[in-house]
Image (tube, grey):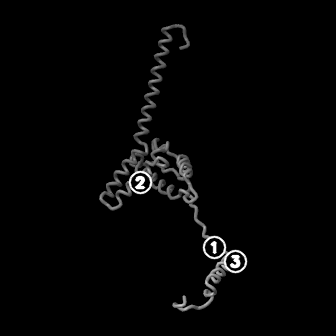
Amino acid sequence: MWTHDPYEAGRRALEWVLENQQKSRAKSDEEAQQKQFALGIYWERWFAKESSKRQGTRVEVRWKRDESLKWEDEGYGIKHQPWAQRKVERITAGDFEDYWAVLDQRKTDTNDMSGTKKQQKTLIRKLLKEARSDFPHLEIPDFPEISTKKKKIQYMERDEWNRLMGKVVELSDGAARQDLSKEDY
């Protein structure tokens, strides 16, 4: 405690312990408040409300499975994102950019993840709207742009078409160039 006097050292140690306890309590209170207003609370509230609307319908089981995967899936579920544990007021557009990067890691040649991004964006917006019951002035952060990769239609070049038609004529022994009746065909 940077002193040789035992009484002074004891006083300083006591002050140090009390200060650390105060900091620890403040941090604990902040964490409790963060959990109280984290996205998970609004997920539970929204999911219960929406589930009751769909109860007894044909699509109830599939809807619950699909929505639960958006929230809980190990690979990309919202629940596992660090920003989902924060108070909803502290979620930023940068958090969504980081999340899009997580989703981009799952891209394949046939799946650009744009559909998943759209679904996740929709769910997050619904949860943040649910949070407006506790935070009426909650601003929903901007989401990164979702680009979709459109498949290009492949057209035949004129010489490719001519070669194809030539092969058809060759394989049909010239019948492709003649008018055929139904019987002849």
> Which residue type does callout 3 highlight?
Asp
Q: Residue 159 carries which label?
A: 3
Q: Mark 2 vs mark 3: which is more N-terminal?
A: 2
Q: Mark 3: few, some, or many residues within 10 Å (few <14, many ≥20)?
A: few
Tag 3, which secondary structure? helix
Coordinates of residue 71 in the picture (x, y in percent): 43, 49
> Which residue type does callout 2 highlight?
Glu
Q: Which of 133 and 172 is in front in this view?
A: 172
Q: Mark 2 vs mark 1: which is more N-terminal?
A: 2
> Which residue type does callout 1 highlight?
Tyr
C-alpha separation, residue under disc 3 versus residue under disc 1: 12 Å
Coordinates of residue 62 in the picture (x, y in percent): 38, 57
C-alpha separation, residue under disc 2 versus residue under disc 3: 51 Å
Residue under the image location 67 percent in, 80 percent down: 162
Q: Give the left or right position of residue 60, taking residue 92 as reference.
A: left
Q: Residue 141 carries which label?
A: none
Q: Mark 1: few, some, or many residues within 10 Å (few <14, many ≥20)?
A: few
Q: Residue 67 carries which label?
A: 2
Q: Which of 155 and 113 is in front in this view?
A: 155
Q: Indicate whether 23 appears above or below 11.
A: below
Q: Indicate whether 30 appears above or below 72.
A: above
Q: Give the left or right position of residue 164, taking residue 112 as reference.
A: right
Coordinates of residue 108 in the picture (x, y in percent): 56, 56
Corner quadrant of residue 170: bottom right
Q: Mark 1 points at which residue?
A: 155
Corner quadrant of residue 61: bottom left
Q: Nearer the viewer, mark 3 or mark 1?
A: 3
Residue under the image location 45 percent in, 25 percent down: 22
Tag 2, which secondary structure? helix
